[in-house]
Amino acid sequence: MSRIWIKNPRASFDGTHANQANGGVVVEGQRIAEVLAAGQQPSQTVDSVFDASGMVLTPGLINTHHHFYQTLTRAYRDALNKPLFAWLTSLYPVWANLTNEMVEVSTELALSELMLSGCTTASDHHYVFSNSLDEAIDRQAMVAAKLGMRVVLTRGSMSLGESTGGLPPDKVVQTEAAILDDSLRLVQRYHDPADYAMCQVALAPCSPFSVTPELMRETASLAKQHKVLLHTHLAETHDETQFCIDQLGLRPVDYMESVDWLSDRTWFAHGIHFNSEEIARLGRAGCGVSHCPTSNMTLASGICPVAELEHAGVNVGLGVDGSASNDCSNLIQEVRMSLLIQRLGQAQQSSEAPLTAHTDSLRWATQGGAALLHRPELGRLSVGAAADLALFSLDEPRFSGSDDALAALILGGAHRAEAVMINGHWRVSHGALIDVDMAQLQARHQQLAMSLWQVNT
Ligand SMILES: [Zn+2]
């Protein structure tokens, strides 16, 4: 098995601490075989050396919430400058016309964009299924395998249409039997439970306002039976809380408890509007929260109480969220956004707690995301961890004059990885994808986006 020494980065982050791996790491096959302190040499000979001097080395970043298909409706005119519910009702009719080809190409575009930003594991939440779209997850699995990206694909669902009190149009909701059958099919076909798996499947009814309590309960039971994770949006906006109280007579967390969702198998996207008793309950249950700062700012949803959640024992990861609310899929930028929004949140409180550190944000994007996805072999530079690495060059005007290189990466606004390795294979080199023709992909993606909007004009 060949041994590669990623040698002497200027700075490093091992998933928890700064600069513990400044001698670099030795990769053997799909795993990290050695982690070297500054000045330390590999214990055995290596076959090749990657000179990382001048670069920052981190574990590959982990994205825990996204909707790849939304890259086709970025900056969509009718949805601009609106809060969540109005934004969604502008977009649902457009998304209703998605095709299998559109999901395939948008997945390739989103995964490519993520890799270029240092991401090596991505979760996606696809919940739009219509008559013209029956192979969404199958196409996503195929594209991820082609790109060599590690993924956790979630089978989303909507079963509560407008005519029965839900928010989405009836055209994009499915029967519960069809949803559960397809969920089982996808778990059996694509979920690899092994360590270092490249593809896993989780089950993800969309949100309290688009799914019935029966489907939530049935999905939880299916997930338990097949030992897969559960994911959904929760406590994103005040509108959602009000919907839950009006329609279900419960606040969002009480509702989740009533449908058997408060478990360590569950991670929620956003998790903003919780009270302190609810936060304690989420912590006791071992739930995870995907913090999506850019989306929360774009839709004016609020600030996720990350410090309180972590203090209570909730695992926190980062998510770029769907590209129609971000509008980009750049995970290293999201690290900076999470730092800034958390600091802003602290400014609004009178707490004496220490300020959120840049290493906290990086930890959410690495070890935090791994914990939330139950993947302890990811998100860290340690012996035996997966060889998923991101290297960022500091050779740009924005970093010139910086002292602490790791802090400069975040504070200076890094947006592009120089090199990315996934499962022991280089996927990004010199800031470009090795085996994707980006110009051709962008042209096809833009053309499909325009044809999607045209159906609605
Ligand atoms: Zn979302």
Image (tube, rainbow, N blue to C red):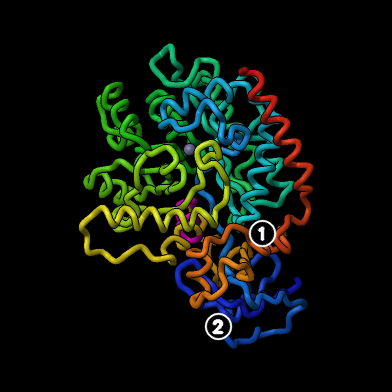
Depth check, front residue: 90 or 226: 90
Residue 314 percent location from the top left of the image: 35, 53
The residue furthest top is 163
Locate residue 337: give its quadrant. bottom left
Quadrant housing the N terminus: bottom right
The secondary element bearing badge 2 is classed as: loop
Q: Which segment is the magenta one? A: 366-373
Tell me the tag on residue 37. Answer: 2
Locate residue 449: give its quadrant. top right
Mark closest to the chain's N terminus, 1 or 2:
2
Q: Label 2 crowding class (10 Å Cα cut-off): few <14, some 14-19, many 20+? A: some
Query: Residue at the location (77% across, 77% down)?
Result: 47
Depth check, front residue: 214 or 367: 367
Tell me the tag on residue 422. Answer: 1
The secondary element bearing badge 1 is classed as: strand
Residue 311 percent location from the top left of the image: 29, 58
Residue type (three-letter) at the residue carrying disc 2: Ala
Quadrant housing the C terminus: top right
Asked if residue 114 shows in the view, the reply is: yes
Q: Main secondary structure of the magenta part?
A: helix
Residue 450 lies, with reference to residue 64, above or below; the image says above
Q: Is residue 352 left or right of residue 8?
A: left
How far apart are labels 1 and 2 at the CA level? 22 Å
Asked if residue 193 shows in the view, the reply is: no
Residue type (three-letter) at the residue carrying disc 1: Ile
Q: Is residue 315 left or right of residue 425?
A: left
Instruction: Say whether marks 1 and 2 touch (CB < 8 Å).
Output: no
Query: Residue at the location (49% across, 66% down)?
Result: 15
